Image (spheres, rainbow, N blue to C red):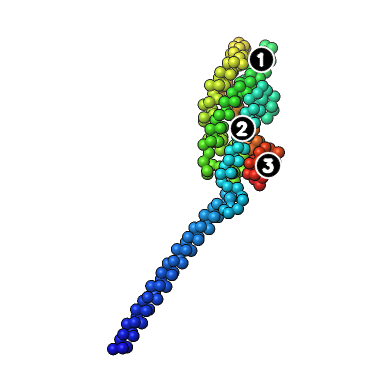
Amino acid sequence: MRSDLTASFMRCLGAAVAICFFMFLMASAVTHAENTWLEKGRGLWNTFGVKSGSSDMTVKEIGAGLKEALRVGTENVVARLGQTDGFNKDPAVHIPLPGQLAGMKSALDKIGMAGRLEDLEQRLNRAAEVATPRAKQLFVQAIEEMSFDDVMTIYKGPKDAATQYFRGKMSPALTQEMAPVVEKSLAQVEAVQKYDSIMNAYRSIPFVPEVKADLTDYVVEKGMDGIFYYMAREEAAIRADPAKRTTDLLRRVFGGA
């Protein structure tokens, strides 16, 4: 009788030990899982240049610094190009005559009117200079709409990452915004009248091929090329040149960029 009781007791004790051991294993597994996810979270955090529990930059600081840099850069670009001779006397962004019109020069030389093409070329550049300030608000809007992912992709990206972002995001809106301004400015600087006068003179020459150019689309395209050209220069300078980091925040964010 006593041996039966002892056997039963031992079976119960064994079961209890087994249950306790199983619960210990489950608790250990949960703790390990929690630690694994915590480490992954810390690792992800650190890949963005942010270290928990230290004085390093926060994501908020990086975002604010990047946006400040882009605002400074875009203001510089607009100020540079949106003034008299901003396009016209800058070889890097000067807008030449459309290819079709440039090909008319030899024909117009025969009637002493080739000089009108040079005047028209200057007026095309003037139109771009008048239209450029309209880009400023679009840049500001694009900066404000940047998501967390946008900020980190740009911050960790190549030296023209922000310019690529702007070009992809802004080109349709910028084209739509600048087109009516360019069209109006072409009229203001009398480029349209000059173009019509040149075309009338050209068509009076026998046997010349037909030529036609859309001045508005051409100036918008070349104007945008100039804006993004200098945007890329500004962005690269802020990343690489300490003298371009004009505030404490910019120096902090881009000091190691």
Image: 233 above or below 24: above
User: Around disc 1, counting alpha carbons within 10 Å, would you say few (fewer than 14), some (14 to 19), or many (20 or more)?
Assistant: some
Camera-nearest residue between 103 and 115: 115
What amino acid type is highlighted by mark number 3? Answer: Ala
The earlier-in-sequence mark between 1 and 3 is 1
**CB under 8 Å between discs 1 and 3:** no
Camera-nearest residue between 102 and 159: 159
Image: 149 above or below 219: below
Q: Secondary structure at mark 3?
A: helix
In the rendering, at what x and y percent does residue 190 appear? 61, 14
In the rendering, at what x and y percent does residue 117 appear? 65, 17
* Residue in the picture at 62% in, 39% down: 160
Quadrant assignment for the C terminus: top right
Using the rendered image of the protein, determine whether residue 226 is visible from the camera's viewpoint. Answer: no
Determine which of the numbered discs, if any, sits on residue 74 in the image: 2
Q: Nearer the viewer, mark 1 or mark 2?
A: 2
- In this view, the residue farthest toward the left is 1
Determine which of the numbered discs, if any, sits on residue 116 in the image: 1
Q: Secondary structure at mark 2?
A: helix
What amino acid type is highlighted by mark number 1? Answer: Arg
Image: 11 above or below 232: below
Q: Secondary structure at mark 1?
A: helix
